[in-house]
Image (cartoon, rainbow, N blue to C red):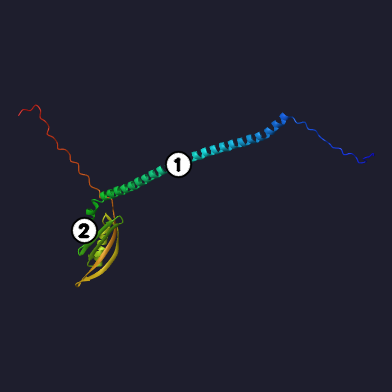
Amino acid sequence: MIRINLLKPETKDFRETVVTPGISEERSRKGPNLGNLIFFVLIIGLGAFYFFQKKAFDRENALLDTARQEKSQLQYVEAKLEEQRIARESLDKKITLIEALNARRDLAPRLMDELSRLLPEWVWLSEVTYDDNGIQISGRALSNNLIADYISSLEASPQIMNVNLVSSTQRTVQADQYLEFSLRALIEKKPAPVPAPAKTEPAAQPADKKGVKP
């Protein structure tokens, strides 16, 4: 019995690939090796970057520690300089005070002598206070006219100026009446000029009489 197949015969496209055993193995090894190499290089780069960053960080820390030490030393020096400045200011004040006291050393006796010399009769001094702003004079008098006379005498003095009446109060003690007064004045701080000693001419020496026999 004869069968005739009227269907189109199936055609299969077969592509033959020639596989070379040596080349395929080399390609299979080259792919993973290149990836490992890149990963290894990346690890080395990260390690080098970390190393340099750590080195820079350590250097910055060292500089920071040095700066802190220098700052602490400077603070100590500044504290010492401040102590020296305070001590110098205190010493300058003491020197100024001593110089002022030396300048006023002979002022008080002259001032008291002047105040006492200019006192009118029936006027008494009870207290005299002296400071840099002037003198404060307290005393007693029998009348306002006597106080006015004392003020006029003080203003005429070359050592005292700008005399002002601060207060004048009437007091009564056992039927005795008097006035308590207070004056404020400025003083001339320049000492009175001391007259220069007179120059004395040397005594004439007697001439030697040479060649004269007694």
Callout 1: helix, strand or loop? helix
Q: Residues within 10 Å of mark 1 (few under 14, many from 20)?
A: few
Asked where in the image residue 164 lies, by quadrant, the reply is: bottom left
Count of marks, rendered view: 2
Residue 203 as seen in the image, left or right of residue 127: left
Residue shown at 35% from the left, 46% from the top: 83
**Residue 72 image position (x, y, % from top left):** 41, 44
119 vs 14, nearest the viewer: 14
Q: Quadrant of the N terminus?
A: top right
**As drawn, 131 above or below 76:** below
10 vs 86, nearest the viewer: 10
Q: Amino acid at mark 2?
A: Ser
Q: Which residue is mark 2?
A: 116
Residue shown at 59% from the left, 37% from the top: 43
**Residue 205 image position (x, y, % from top left):** 13, 35
Asked where in the image residue 180 lies, by quadrant, the reply is: bottom left
7 vs 100, nearest the viewer: 7
**Residue 19 image position (x, y, % from top left):** 75, 31
Residue shown at 24% from the left, 70% from the top: 171
Which residue, as the protein is rendered here, is positioned at the far bottom? Answer: 175
Q: Amino acid at mark 1?
A: Asp
**Residue 130 image position (x, y, % from top left):** 27, 57
150 vs 104, nearest the viewer: 104
Which residue, as the protein is rendered here, is positioned at the far right? Answer: 1
Please identify, in this view, whether the residue under mark 2 or under mark 1 is nearer the observer.
1
Q: Which residue is mark 1?
A: 65
Which residue, as the protein is rendered here, is positioned at the far top? Answer: 211
User: Residue 125 has which mark?
Assistant: none
- Distance from Cα at disc 2 to Cα at disc 1: 75 Å
